[in-house]
Image (cartoon, rainbow, N blue to C red):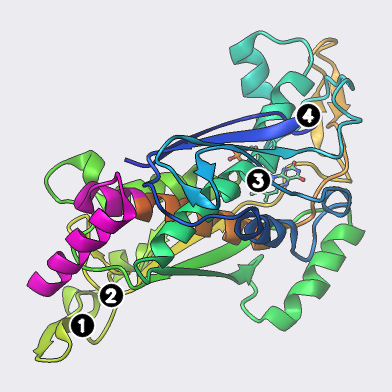
């Protein structure tokens, strides 16, 4: 089982993550993780912070002489920008975790909620996802992601203008990203128990990305409005391909299991909650109406959300792969994997 746990605050010393269950003998370097971290920092509409941060990973354990040794992999990503850590605020931001977090944790300073609810934490997830992607590449499983919509517009030529206009107006925008996973054999996940369904685990991982409010697999919501004849992917067989489909409306998953077709996921990202032109709110202490707190912020974060989606999907696929083929040593997993491919 591949599992991971993150720690760290947005403007604290560092983000940390422990990845447990990565098999031994996988080659792994800082450079591969840093490449993914750099992708997460990109995107039109990012705030000034991403220019300040130079996300670079420091590996503490689980790797020796460039290869994993089967023990937990611990790593950290130091924060360059820590100057806001002591800055208190009480003007609760609509759409953020401030209000619910303050009530739940009995806090007097919304900074104590912001620091952990901030999507800065996703740097740790992307670092963990880079390890999963490295493992999956040994099995020729690849992940890709892209933005498919910004604020309803599908033509990417329109996106910079839309984002610039929103920034000018002190507003923010959301959108939709898509993750595609190729090379996944049929049979990852399972129909036999709810928490082994691959679709459920992928959806949960994507929904756990801050600001993601809806997840689709394949046709997604559209299935509700179409007849069965237009939804279900007919099955074919040929000697060289084996079983296959000519369409992929299911997005590569049937019965909670991969069906051999590319897995296609979409995530809808809401507009950023911190608006330069602040929304109406209430002050936590005075209980009087106030404008919401403003701190330097992104205008649109759909592009990094796509990279994060790819990372958390990689972790789920890697976990399902290890569940099916065992998890201690890369060579044993490969033997089991090849044997399975030969059977199906
Ligand atoms: C990559 C990324 C960057 C984000 N940047 C910001 C930001 O700069 N300011 C902000 O208010 N929210 C930002 N968010 C969204 C908040 O983290 C999120 O809305 C908040 O934690 C509340 O969680 P919820 O939207 O899931 O309810 C970002 C989200 C992502 C995925």
Residue 38 at what x, y percent from top left? 71, 59
Magenta segment = 319-344
Give the residue at mark 2: 261
Q: Residues within 10 Å of mark 4 (few under 14, many from 20)?
A: some
Give the residue at mark 4: 13
Q: Quadrant of residue 6?
A: top right
Q: Is residue 3 above or below residue 343?
A: above
Q: Between residue 55 and residue 259, name the one nearer to us.
A: 55
Give the residue at mark 1: 245
**Dot 4 and dot 3 residues touching (CB under 8 Å):** no
Whether residue 344 can be seen here: no
Of circles 4 and 2, the one toward us is: 4
Q: Is residue 113 above or below residue 328?
A: above
Residue 164 at what x, y percent from top left? 86, 67
Q: Residue at x 80, y 66 (%)?
A: 163
Of circles 4 and 3, the one toward us is: 4
């Amino acid at each position: 089982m591949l599992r991971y746990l993150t720690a760290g605050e947005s403007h604290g010393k560092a983000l940390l993550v422990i990845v447990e269950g990565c098999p031994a003998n996988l080659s792994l370097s800082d450079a591969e993780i840093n490449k993914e971290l750099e992708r997460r920092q990109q995107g039109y509409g990012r705030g000034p912070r991403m220019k300040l941060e130079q996300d670079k990973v420091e590996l503490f354990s689980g790797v020796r002489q460039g290869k994993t040794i089967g023990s937990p992999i611990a790593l950290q990503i130091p924060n360059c920008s820590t100057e806001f850590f002591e800055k208190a605020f009480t003007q609760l931001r609509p759409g953020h975790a401030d209000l619910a977090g303050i009530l739940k944790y009995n806090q007097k300073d919304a900074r104590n909620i912001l620091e952990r609810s901030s999507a800065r934490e996703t740097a740790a997830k992307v670092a963990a996802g880079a390890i999963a992607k490295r493992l999956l590449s040994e099995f020729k499983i690849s992940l890709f992601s892209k933005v498919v919509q910004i604020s309803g517009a599908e033509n990417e030529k329109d996106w910079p203008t839309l984002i610039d206009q929103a920034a000018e107006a002190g507003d923010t925008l959301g959108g939709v990203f898509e993750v595609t996973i190729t090379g996944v054999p049929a049979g990852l996940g399972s129909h036999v128990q709810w928490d082994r369904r691959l679709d459920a685990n992928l959806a949960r991982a994507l929904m756990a990305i801050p600001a993601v409010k809806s997840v689709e697999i394949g046709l997604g919501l559209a299935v509700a409005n179409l007849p069965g004849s237009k939804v279900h992917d007919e099955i074919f067989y040929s000697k060289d391909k084996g079983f296959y489909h000519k369409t992929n409306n299911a997005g590569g998953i049937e019965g909670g299991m991969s069906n051999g077709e590319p897995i296609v996921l979409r995530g809808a990202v809401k507009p950023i909650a911190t608006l330069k032109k602040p929304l109406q709110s209430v002050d936590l202490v005075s209980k009087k109406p106030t404008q919401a707190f403003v701190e330097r912020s992104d205008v649109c974060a759909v592009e990094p959300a796509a990279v994060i989606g790819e990372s958390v999907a990689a972790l789920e696929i890697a976990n399902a792969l290890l569940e099916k083929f065992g998890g201690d040593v890369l060579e044993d997993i490969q033997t089991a994997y090849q044997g399975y491919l030969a059977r199906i």
